[in-house]
Amino acid sequence: MYQHLTDEQLLHMLQKDGRTAFEEIYRRYCEQMSLYVLKVIHSTEDARDIVQDVFVSIWKRNDELRICQSLKSYLLKSVINLSLRYIERHHRIQDFLKSLAAYCSGLDVSTTGKLEFQELVSKLHGVVAMLPAKMQEVYVLSRDENFRTRK
């Protein structure tokens, strides 16, 4: 219905007739933004989540949203920012898990004692269980199944 409208017109319509204008914006840009994010973070599921977060934010703020640049530029800037946050968070957790694994692998079970070692392993599993599902999967694959993340 709104395919013929410019992005500027859609943004104006978004404030008045939010749903249909939003659907057109989503249709125009969702796939393009998802492909861009996928190239940056190399995870289809997480790329989809990042783009969805941007569109959810637009939907929630549709009546107050003021974009002073082109819609495409705004969307790109938004997905770039969320992608950078994802990368930063992902690498911090990966660094922590690598340090923890290195520490655990250096423990001498004979001096630490089997019970203390089991307690440490239990705590490690508890920490891993608190991670988001995708990060748990990365940890399990890298530690238990010897898969490595790309650099």
Image: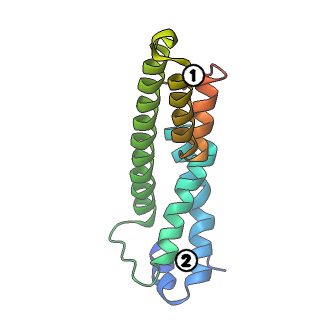
Q: Which mark is residue 91?
A: none
Q: Are marks 1 and 2 in contact (CB under 8 Å)?
A: no
Residue 117 in percent (x, y) is at 52, 23
- Secondary element under disc 2, as helix, strand or loop, is loop
Q: Is residue 51 visible?
A: yes
Which of the two labelled residues, at mark 1 and mark 2, occupies the earlier sequence position?
Answer: 2
Residue 16 in percent (x, y) is at 50, 90
Would residue 101 be found to the left or right of residue 136 on screen? left
Q: Is residue 100 above or below residue 27?
A: above
Residue 26 in percent (x, y) is at 59, 67
Residue shown at 56% from the left, 48% from the top? 47
Residue shown at 47% from the left, 85% from the top? 15
- How many residues crowd around disc 2 within 10 Å: few (fewer than 14), some, or many (20 or more)? few
- Of marks 1 and 2, the one in the foreground: 1
Q: Is residue 12 above or below residue 134?
A: below
Q: Amino acid at mark 2?
A: Leu
Seen as rendered, the residue at the extreme bottom is 16
Please state which of residues 78 and 110 is positioned toward the viewer in this rendering. Answer: 110
Residue shown at 52% from the left, 54% from the top? 50
Please state which of residues 105 and 19 is positioned toward the viewer in this rendering. Answer: 105
The residue that disc 1 covers is 148
Q: Amino acid at mark 1?
A: Arg
The residue that disc 2 covers is 5
- Secondary element under disc 1, as helix, strand or loop, is loop
